[in-house]
Amino acid sequence: MTDRNDDLFSAARAVIPGGVNSPVRAYGSVGGTPRFLASARGARVTDAAGVEYVDLVASWGPALLGHAHPEIVAAVQDAATRGLSFGAPTEGEVELAELIADRVRVGDAAPIERVRLVSTGTEATMTAIRLARGATGRDLLVKFAGHYHGHSDGLLAAAGSGVATLALPGSAGVPAPVAAQTLVIDYNDRAALEAVFAEHGERIAAVIVEAAAANMGVVAPDAGFNAFIAETAHAHGALMILDEVLTGFRVHPAGFWGLQAAAGELYAPDIVTFGKVVGGGMPLAALGGRADVMDLLAPLGPVYQAGTLSGNPLSVAAGLATLRLATPEVYAAVDAAASRISTALDDALAGAGVSHAVARAGNLFNASFRPTAPRDYVEAQAQESFRYAPFFHSMREQGVALPPSVFEAWFLTAAHGEDDLQRIEAALPVAAQAAARA
């Protein structure tokens, strides 16, 4: 017997490649039929068969305040009555750019002087790289294995065999000469960063790094590592691109940079990219940075970027409402919920005798099925990932929706109340036993 999700997935596969419009949604790593969501409110989502779940995906991060927050919905509805898209400047764009710049500051440190709004995180990072190349007149990019910065050609590169080896394509359709402009090194490895600059320093335009890795599971930077990236890049005339598409405005009012700066680790990224929370669940992203770098973008400078839907008024309205509602109290609530659930996850897996480590970066966390938390991509891959599928399905059967991959962060929201947290806590020991039996 099939339910509505099975029927929809069958229909989708007939007209959509793989039945989904973003690969991880296909449940490829956990098996089974994807849940087609029909609605969401607060901390709960409901699938096409009418089954409700406590949600720990949060639209992959944007739902900081919970799904369908009434004030955000009202802001979008109000904007829609005035027009869906203009292809012209709006007052809201100015307000949002000002708000982004104002939030990303700790004390006198304020790395955002100019902001350009775009539509997706991929577009933000792609533009940041083009801008860095235009600013430096150099071609090479350094990235870290396991870090995801969107699906533009130069970023879909797989590591070569050595520290300073030019990368090979990590996806069909990416020309080898394009991938070869990206140098891929191990994360949290200072010696590797020094070595790559020693060999290629005069040709490197920028180092791009997730502020805290969250696409190979949650892997926080070692203490001082982000500052070391900035110091090393600047010493060689290169720029630092800090990718906060996922962490920006989710783990702190000023993003992961702000979380580190508030703790005393202060460094100066040249370009910062934002997405997800900055658009409140609508298609919107941004890049910001020093005025002398950002002003190289057209129409002032020679680095071209454009978009018909850049600064779309509905997305801007959602972003403005979200950031204005994301008060210190919201972050305190999300942090507390994340601490509670990550502790319960740790306890449940330990109680079931499952080798594991729960990794944290701010209020982001997940479990790795290995005895110690990974520090890089090799370690992230060296785990008993086969234990996640039964864990995932057990949680789903108990009414809790997790990310359908062991390599994704778990997201709490300000809407997760006591009933939601208790339901998650009750489900974890049963799921841990399922993982133990795998």
Image: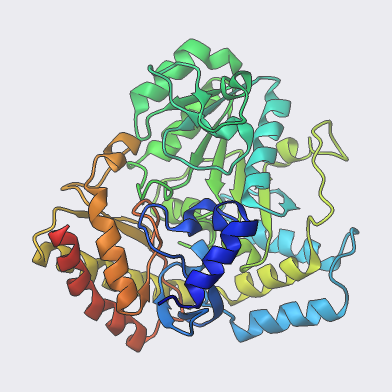
- Image quadrant where residue 271 sits: top right
**Residue nearest the observer in this picture, 19 or 163:** 19
Q: Residue at x 68, y 72 (%)?
A: 318
- Residue at the top extreme? 199
- Image quadrant where residue 51 sits: bottom left
Evaluate whether residue 111 shows in this view: no
**Residue nearest the observer in this picture, 211 or 180:** 180
- Residue at the bottom extreme? 419
State how many labels appear. Answer: 0
The image quadrant where one finds the C terminus is bottom left
Evaluate whether residue 190 shows in this view: yes
Q: Residue at x 73, y 41 (%)?
A: 291
**Residue nearest the observer in this picture, 166 or 301:** 166
Q: Is residue 133 left or right of residue 425?
A: right
When the figure is inspected, residue 118 is found, relative to residue 418, above or below; the finding is: above
The image quadrant where one finds the N terminus is bottom left
Q: Residue at x 44, y 16 (%)?
A: 164
Colouring of the image: rainbow
Q: Position of residue 245 (x, y in %)?
A: 56, 52
When the figure is inspected, residue 1 is found, relative to residue 295, above or below; the finding is: below
When the figure is inspected, residue 380 is found, relative to residue 387, above or below; the finding is: above
Q: Position of residue 154 (x, y in %)?
A: 60, 30
Q: Is residue 427 left or right of residue 19?
A: left
Q: Position of residue 276 (x, y in %)?
A: 58, 60
When the figure is inspected, residue 171 is found, relative to residue 360, above or below; the finding is: above
Q: Residue at x 50, y 42 (%)?
A: 148
Q: Is residue 111 left or right of residue 306?
A: left
Q: Position of residue 128 (x, y in %)?
A: 66, 39
